[in-house]
Image: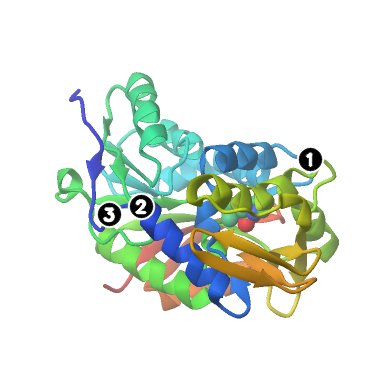
């Protein structure tokens, strides 16, 4: 087993400057918005972890159940002697379920923007899977364009769990799938976790939990801007909002200003009307068919889909390049 250090892939990962530029651009836009990828600093990742354990937040439990139940069937679709590439791997908890069932996989490539987590996790993965080459890549998976050189000669499978794909607009999701197809190559398989449209009250509760953890997670975005960009958001003057739009098939999260106010971010002053919101996240909800149609538009054919009625796990085969 070789000792690998994380490969820094180009284009480079987010920098403080890019964060500042995205924040100023988003808060200068009409309506105001912020990219959801910035939720996940250390505090935000901890809060998201608590969200996944809330009784109301079913997606993580559902997906873990589906992966446990169907791991052998999923793994049987991987090409022999493959490298498994995970986009936005976090703690690799879900990939471990597939790796345990996929005896022929030779390498695991967790791709994540957070290098610290990735390195810690790689050490543990090498202990738990001594026969696997563990090749972490520090990168923003949304801008990644190539597989790491170490796995360029191996057949590849991809893994994109968690319904992170729901953060994309449908046309962006198709574009991401198309790019994933170029990274994974002809004949590859991609496994994607996708949350399903369902009764609005179930969706509402999943994003308006009774303990207020989701509210904290949303408001942490402003706290992070204060911490990292020296801004002066008064967190008590903003409220968490989350609602399901049945027409748009998505949960929208916002932070609503409770009053007319001005906020300073560096040299920039941002003005808020009373009730004005910052749109912080969309979480699109699909049907099995609508997701398969979307995947088709991204160059992938459906191989199989597993569901518990709440969430779905899709296996796709690349058809175009
Ligand atoms: C990680 C994007 C799938 O949309 O459910 C959870 C993020 N936001 N609660 C989701 C989230 C509020 C989550 N994803």
Which badge, 1 or 2, is on the more N-terminal residue? 2
Query: Considering depth in this image, is 221 or 10 the residue closer to the camera?
Result: 221
The local crowd at label 1, few if under 14, some if 14 to 19, many if 20 or more residues have their Cα within 10 Å, is: few
The residue that label 2 is drawn on is 15
Which badge, 1 or 3, is on the more N-terminal residue? 3
Q: Secondary structure at mark 2?
A: loop
Q: Residue at x 35, y 19 (%)?
A: 127
User: Can you tell which quarter of the image residue 99 is in?
Assistant: top left
**Tags 3 and 2 in contact by the CB under 8 Å rule?**
yes
The local crowd at label 3, few if under 14, some if 14 to 19, many if 20 or more residues have their Cα within 10 Å, is: few
Residue 14 in percent (x, y) is at 37, 53
| Residue lying farthest to the front in this orientation | 267
Give the side of residue 89 with respect to residue 130, left or right.
right
The residue that label 1 is drawn on is 55
| Real-space CA distance between mark 3 and mark 2, rounded to the nearest whole angstrom | 8 Å
Note whether 103 is above or below 147 in the view shown: above
The local crowd at label 2, few if under 14, some if 14 to 19, many if 20 or more residues have their Cα within 10 Å, is: few
**Tags 1 and 3 in contact by the CB under 8 Å rule?**
no
| Real-space CA distance between mark 1 and mark 2, rounded to the nearest whole angstrom | 35 Å
Q: Residue at x 43, y 43 (%)?
A: 89
Q: Does residue 282 appear in this view?
A: no
Colour scheme in use: rainbow
Residue 310 in percent (x, y) is at 71, 55
| Residue lying farthest to the top in this orientation | 127
Q: Quadrant of the N terminus?
A: top left
| Real-space CA distance between mark 1 and mark 3, rounded to the nearest whole angstrom | 37 Å
Residue 25 in percent (x, y) is at 48, 71
Residue 272 in percent (x, y) is at 70, 71
């Amino acid at each position: 087993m070789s000792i690998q250090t994380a490969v820094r892939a180009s284009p480079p990962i987010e920098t403080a400057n890019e964060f500042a530029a995205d924040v100023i651009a988003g808060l200068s836009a009409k309506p105001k918005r912020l990219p959801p990828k910035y939720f996940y600093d250390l505090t935000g990742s901890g809060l998201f972890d608590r969200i996944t354990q809330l009784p109301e937040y079913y997606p993580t439990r559902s997906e873990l159940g589906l992966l446990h139940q169907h791991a052998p069937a999923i793994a049987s679709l991987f090409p022999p002697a493959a490298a498994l590439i995970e986009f936005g791997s976090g703690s690799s908890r879900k990939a471990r379920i597939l790796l345990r069932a996929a005896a022929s996989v030779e390498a695991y490539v967790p791709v994540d923007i957070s290098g610290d987590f990735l390195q810690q996790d790689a050490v543990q993965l090498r202990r738990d899977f001594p026969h696997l080459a563990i090749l972490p890549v520090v990168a923003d998976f949304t801008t990644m364009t190539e597989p790491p050189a170490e796995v360029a000669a191996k057949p590849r499978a991809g893994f994109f769990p968690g319904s992170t794909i729901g953060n994309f607009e449908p046309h962006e999701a198709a574009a991401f799938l198309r790019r994933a197809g170029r990274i994974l190559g002809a004949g590859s398989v991609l496994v994607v976790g996708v949350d399903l449209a369902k009764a609005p009250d179930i969706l509402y509760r999943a994003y308006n939990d009774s303990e207020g953890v989701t509210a904290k997670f949303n408001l942490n975005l402003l706290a992070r801007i204060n911490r990292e960009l020296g801004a002066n958001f008064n967190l008590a003057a903003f409220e968490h909002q989350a609602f399901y739009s049945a027409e748009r098939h998505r949960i929208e999260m916002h932070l609503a200003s409770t009053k007319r106010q001005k906020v300073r971010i560096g040299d920039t002053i941002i003005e808020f009307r009373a009730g004005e919101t910052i749109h912080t996240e969309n979480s699109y909800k699909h049907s099995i068919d609508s997701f398969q149609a979307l995947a088709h538009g991204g160059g992938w054919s459906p191989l199989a889909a597993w569901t518990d009625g709440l969430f779905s796990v899709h296996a796709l085969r690349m058809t175009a390049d």
